Amino acid sequence: MTKRKLPAPLTGMVPPIVTPLHSRDVLDVEGLSRLVERLISGGVSALFVLGTTGEGPALSYRLRRQMVERTCQFVNGRIPVLVGITDASLVEALEMARFAADAGADAIVTAGPFYFPLTQPELERYIRSVLAESPLPLMLYNMPGLTKVTFGVETVRKLMGLDKVIGIKDSSGDMPYVHQILRVAKARKDFTVLLGPETLTGEAMLMGAHGGVSGGAMVNPRLYSDLCTAALAKDYKKTFKLHEQVVELNARIYYQGAYSMPITRNIKCALSLLGVCDDFVCEPFQRCDKNERKIIAQHLKELGLSRA
């Protein structure tokens, strides 16, 4: 398998890809292959596997490994692959880090271990423990809404002193926090700052962030890739125009149905309507019903997106 060097910093669009499923513990392999090709042809810079949108913590360890192995196989070194290893168990996180390295991934991504709340010193020690045994470089994943702990700005600054800490993906939606991280990140020109909330990506990139981790890129990869390209070039007019299209896609696709975690199920629904992959989602969540599919199908049509 071909390996490519991970850019430093990593710039552009890094979609947090869904895990296509046929059933509870069966990977939709053909759908995954189509999804990888759709994203690469759409100009994305890298792929993030087993993130929140990828339902990583809800998958069996066997299925997580299969997802990593197959993704790396289909990518075949054309773009970098980042693998989420977030887990309540340090042992399991390290096992996934080693497996990702053997499969051909380029970096690992981790939030703090969920369930138990950690102090900042405990969080820092946890990351150092991962780094001590991980064969791959690591990107921090700030996801306080789901893990109950934030990577404090001072903690990030300390961890930046470790060469194997290559960046941070922030999904807090807290722009003042992002501005503080960007200020601290100036100390390392090779340190990557990526944004999770896609309606903030253009703004953050114009202020110095390097890219986005946007689920919507699976629905319209070229739109999100072009947004990053425009923002990196400081083309304000084009960035604002593409940002408006991202906001519109969010409104039409993400927020259909009264569910606590609608984004993954609705993206999978959209992808199934576009002929990419199955729409099965991990329990306790359920796939979109017939009425929701009908609404999303209409919105895809109005957005100018159709089955390949």
Image: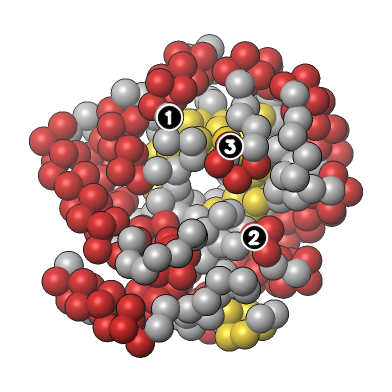
Q: Give the crowd class for mark 3: few <14, some 14-19, many >=20 residues within 10 Å.
A: some
Position above or below: 272 against 175: below
Label 2: which residue? 56
Label 3: which residue? 144
Position above or below: 255 against 32: above
Q: Give the amino acid type for the residue marked by disc 3 in the picture.
A: Pro
Q: Quadrant of the C terminus?
A: bottom left
Q: Give the crowd class for mark 2: few <14, some 14-19, many >=20 residues within 10 Å.
A: many
Chain-order first, disc 1 or disc 2: 2
Residue in the picture at 31% in, 51% down: 225
Task: Determine if residue 303 is in view.
Answer: yes
Q: Give the amino acid type for the residue marked by disc 1 in the picture.
A: Asp
Chain-order first, disc 3 or disc 1: 3
Label 1: which residue? 174
Position above or below: 142 against 91: above
Q: Position of residue 103 (x, y in %)?
A: 72, 61
Q: Secondary structure at mark 2?
A: helix
Q: Give the amino acid type for the residue marked by disc 2 in the picture.
A: Gly
Q: Quadrant of the N terminus?
A: bottom right
Chain-order first, disc 2 or disc 3: 2
Residue in the picture at 46% in, 70% down: 265
The label shown at residue 225 is none
Residue in the picture at 70% in, 48% down: 86
Most foreground residue, 240 or 117: 117
